[in-house]
Image (spheres, grey):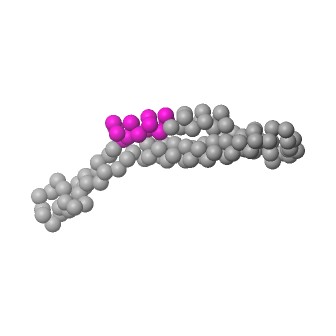
């Protein structure tokens, strides 16, 4: 539970940093070259500029969102286990390898 709570907090801070960077420097404006010509037929004012987020920052933001979702769901799962096991402290459960891997294995 502690691991996933720490990772969630770390990814939340990382997401905020990426969002701040997008606000400061991540937007790109691509104007069509045809807007520089005086010929009215060449001008396309409605589609003349495209605003986008830099691809590297968009990818990083998507990674942050994915990790936040993962760690939030793990926090909820582990909290459920904690509640179930705490409600029955005298009950001994047999664990198998899948249980071990669930709790202590594949840390992300």
State which quadrant residue 32 falls in: bottom left
Identify which residue, 8 or 47, lies in the foreground: 8
Q: Main secondary structure of the magenta part?
A: helix
Residue 83 % position (x, y):
71, 42
Identify which residue, 53 or 13, lies in the foreground: 13
Residue 82 % position (x, y):
72, 40
For the point 44% across and 34% down, which residue is it? 17
User: Is 22 left or right of 60, judged from the image as shown?
Assistant: left
State which quadrant residue 100 falls in: top right
Identify which residue, 31 or 99, lies in the foreground: 99
State which quadrant residue 95 falls in: top right
Q: Is residue 63 visible?
A: no
For the point 69% across and 45% down, which residue is it? 80
User: Is 70 left or right of 51, judged from the image as shown?
Assistant: right
For the point 23% across and 57% down, which residue is it? 48
Q: Is residue 20 magenta?
A: yes
Q: Magenta segment range?
A: 13-26
Residue 70 % position (x, y):
60, 46
User: Is 67 left or right of 79, judged from the image as shown?
Assistant: left
Q: Is residue 32 visible?
A: yes
Mark count: 0
| 40 relative to 85, above or below | below
Q: Quadrant of the C terminus?
A: top right
User: Is 26 left or right of 61, judged from the image as shown?
Assistant: left
For the point 75% across and 39% down, which residue is it? 86
Q: Quadrant of the N terminus?
A: top right
């Amino acid at each position: 539970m502690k691991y996933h709570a720490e990772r969630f907090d770390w990814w939340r801070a990382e997401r905020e940093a990426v969002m701040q960077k997008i606000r400061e420097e991540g937007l790109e404006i691509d104007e069509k070259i045809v807007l520089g010509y005086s010929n009215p037929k060449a001008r396309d004012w409605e589609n003349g500029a495209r605003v986008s987020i830099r691809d590297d920052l968009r990818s990083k933001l998507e990674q942050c969102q994915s990790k936040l979702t993962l760690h939030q769901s793990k926090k909820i799962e582990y909290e459920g286990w904690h509640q179930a096991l705490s409600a029955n402290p005298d009950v001994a459960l047999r664990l198998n390898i899948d249980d071990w891997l669930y709790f202590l294995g594949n840390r992300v």
